[in-house]
Image: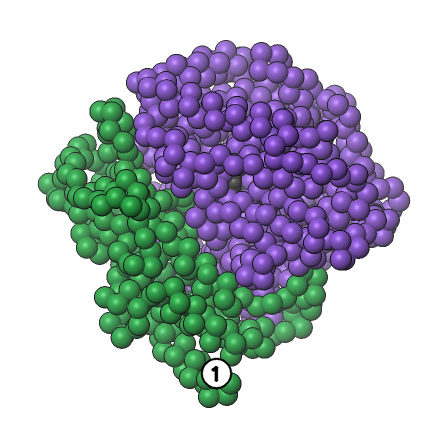
Chain colours: A green, B purple
Amino acid sequence: MHLTLHVWRQKDTRVKGKMVRYHADDINPDMSFLEMLDVVNWQLIENGEEPIAFDHDCREGICGSCGMMINGVAHGPRRATATCQLHMRYFKDGDTIYIEPWRSSAFPVLKDLIVDRSAFDRIIQAGGYISVSTGSAPEANSVLVSKQDSDRAMDAATCIGCGACVAACPNGAASLFTSAKISHLALLPQGQPERQRRVIKMIEAMDHEGFGNCTMHRECEAVCPKAISTDFIARMNREYLCSLLKG
Amino acid sequence: MELNPKVPSGPIEQRWDRHRFEMKLVNPSNKRKHTIIIVGSGLAGASAAASLAELGYHVLCFCFHDSPRRAHSIAAQGGINAAKNYRNDGDSIYRLFDDTVKGGDFRAREANVYRLAQLSGNIIDQCAAQGVPFAREYGGQLDNRSFGGAQVSRTFYARGQTGQQLLLGAYQALECQIHAGHVEMYPRTEMLDLVVVDRQARGIVARNLLTGRIESYAADAVVLATGGYSNVFYLSTNAKNSNATAIWRAYKRGAAFANPCFSQIHPTCIPVTGHYQSKLTLMSESLRNDGRIWVPVQNRDRRPPNQIPEIERDYYLERRYPSFGNLVPRDIASRAAKEVCDEGRGIGKHGLGVYLDFAEAITRSGVAVIREKYGNLFEMYERISGENPYEVPMRIYPAMHYTMGGLWVDYNLMSTITGLFVIGEANFSDHGANRLGASALMQGLADGYFILPYTLSGYIAAAKLDQVSLDCPAFQDCKSQLTDRVKRLLSIKGERTVDSIHQELGKLMWNNCGMVRNECGLQQALEQIPRIREEFWCNVNVLGGEDEINQALEKAGRVADFLELAELMCLDALERAESCGCHFREEFQAPDGEAQRDDEHFCNVSAWEYTGDQRKPVLHKEPLKFEYVTPTRRSYK
Ligand SMILES: Cc1cc2nc3c(=O)[nH]c(=O)nc-3n(C[C@H](O)[C@H](O)[C@H](O)COP(=O)(O)OP(=O)(O)OC[C@H]3O[C@@H](n4cnc5c(N)ncnc54)[C@H](O)[C@@H]3O)c2cc1C
Ligand code: FES
């Protein structure tokens, strides 16, 4: 396969970036998207040009490091697939591909396709946990959890924190990410004692970080590599209202 | 160098309790005055950082990822072992201990393994309380499954994402402590060297990966939780950025490196497709519970699998190992796959693959049950290979996966450098010559949650710790050496990419120090590695600057260290003239082709001491005594 790429190049946060055109030749359909970029980078280095910087690590769709806009879609054309799991067999010979970093004011570009997603960590810090000091836990089977609740909690907990939801949202909201953690913990009996405080604190943090407001476009669900449902956003909103009323 | 394992005496069941009682305590109000550096925030590092911070220590935690949530631990799929005996199927602490010692082919320290088995239950309690959504039965209790090398069901899991859920649990505990101000987190910061002052580990020097600044950090103790070094082989199941720099630097500062040649191959990975391959994807071993492994009986049979009739299929594991069948330990399953492929019966384009077939399980239990158990793994397979495993058998092949070797530690998890602790995959501790499935998560969390917080406190309480200043020569020299090294890497401006040199090293290691080894191949590797290293230092091309994000530079530094570590691995493999667990030396096999241990000469840990770049490292041996589990030849027939 031979492809034309237009890739966002930006030296650092301070300078302005621009799209640069590259040719990707001899691309094998069995390559992953990141392997395609590796091959382009090897070529660039041979020509004395700096390779394209992008975050990646597991290359198995689980660490949440990778992520780029591919032809305007977060993580590209395949549903429920992170960039590292996208394979070139879903492109055609001769295609032109536009590759850009996540675009969101809460995720400043650090270099090329790398953005700063530390805002997500700060949302978790605000309350995305169950406080249980090491050693203080009761025997695991003394707290029963219905299979249904546990499965549902797992559906939410599978979020990889990649930020595609924010990048895809016209408002730059982080609601899918935040609601997934709130729902995961609210669905479990272990999460009950901090339930009200958690939702209030996390939503405050989300607003404080400069994420936009959710108006239910549901673009996030469409691009989420783990296909996390926007039902969790509705659940978060209910949790929030209830907590405000009770609080 | 003295190797004192400091194993407490007395009956094995009481050793840990007694030891905990005998260690000195640190006055709660004094803990705040002690700074602890933890490098790494995977399962081991995050659990340790959170637990030490809860105790009141001032913790500095470092990782090269943009967030602690991304550590390689996140990728563990299958599960975590614990001797809860919820299934009433005969499990016990003693059985988990026994299985682990045997699985490790009698090359682990009994007392450590026993403690691990003892703590396994507490880990599940802790994680469940944190909200880890483990799989449940309809009655609400925790579910279990079985895993390679065990005949009881003791593996706890969260779909095929157990590592993710356990890591998120530890990560959340860590974030909670960061918020409380008890942990200072340094993401995107890579430790490049250890600083030893007056023979005590007193700090690190690290590079800020955003700004390129090289900074020093001082502490009363340093903990390395930096994971394994499978990426020496270039292709492995490890995350792309996993590397050995932290432990290698510590080795060069005086920490003994134990059993470097003990590296594990995982039998069920997706086969390589081309030269551009950047990593190998593991298909959880839990699949072997329901999948049957086979190859055609005939050589070079190119028919599609569904056209090969039952009698022309060889379910070779079931045939050769009737009692464990598809669930034999990893090393045995991997070598068996290599053998059938070497015979010419391998499948797929390159003949380097075997089938893992779910047809029978699907007929027996229905698609829904199989989807419930393995849905996400099947999806992952489909995404990568473009084939649907509900319809055609998966193609799998062994790949480099885990390193049992690592820095030598005593019973307290302290290395041969006073004040330097090593936890998780980075140490050599509990798995001997072969790790059983679902035991790495258990070990990482046992180390981080339940062992280190005690033993590190014991050290702090007893140690004499003088003030150190970042201006002292130890820190200053280290910093200037590292600055020079960065400059040197950037100034070579040769012709080759870092990756191409890394690939060359990886291929050599896979062929000569991989699944099977022999004297001639190892000698050859020992001659070639210095040549590749020289090529690297003369002809690598690292572009970009030093004071910015520079991924090529990061990679170059890591590969430079792999190029040294590889040599130590081969040396160790050569010196260990026996086969044991994953270390399979062709010259030492039983008539039936199984590994032949030599307990008379090699019932020991091999710990290597660095003595200078131009000098051969010195080998020290820690003898292993087996008082509880009698060394026998492993048999899974
Ligand atoms: C695909 C896969 C599946 C697996 N499945 C299972 C399973 O089902 N069950 C099981 O028990 N085990 C499994 N394992 C093994 C297990 O996941 C690992 O052994 C374990 O997670 C290692 O944890 P760790 O905390 O020691 O290290 P890691 O998780 O590798 O963490 C290393 C940390 O150190 C940091 N770091 C490293 N070097 C530096 C440096 N120089 N400076 C700063 N920071 C640094 C990294 O940023 C990271 O935070 C699996 C492994 C793989 C590859
Ligand atoms: S690299 Fe880990 S999710 Fe893509």
Image x and y of residue A55, in percent: 36, 44
Label 1, on which residue? A243
**Residue A22 makes an appearance in the image:** yes
In percent of width and height, residue B340 lies at 45, 31
User: Seen in the image, is B592 located left or right of residue B316?
Assistant: right
Residue B189 on image: x %, y % = 48, 41
Camera-side residue of A161 and B364: A161
Which residue shows up at 30% across the image and 72% down it? A213
Looking at the image, residue B59 lies above or below residue B233:
below
Q: Chain of mark 1?
A: A
In percent of the image, x 22 and y 56: which residue is there?
A73
Extreme-left residue of the structure: A94
* Relative side of B103 to A186, left or right: right
In the visual, does B49 lie left or right of B186? right
Answer with the quarter of the image where residue B414 lies: top right
Three-letter amino acid code of the residue under disc 1: Ser
Which residue is more in the foreground, B633 or B456? Answer: B456
Residue at the image point whose x is 76% and y is 57% from the top:
B28
Secondary element at tag 1: helix
Asked whether residue A84 is in view, the answer is: no
Residue B629: image location, x then y, percent: 78, 40
Q: Which residue occupies 36% across, 74% down? A: A233
- B613 to the left or right of A94: right
Question: Which of the 4 image quadrants contains residue A229?
Answer: bottom left
- The quadrant the N terminus of chain A occupies is top left
Disc 1: CA contacts within 10 A as few (<14), some (14-19) or many (>=20) = some
Between A168 and B201, the one nearer to me in the picture? B201
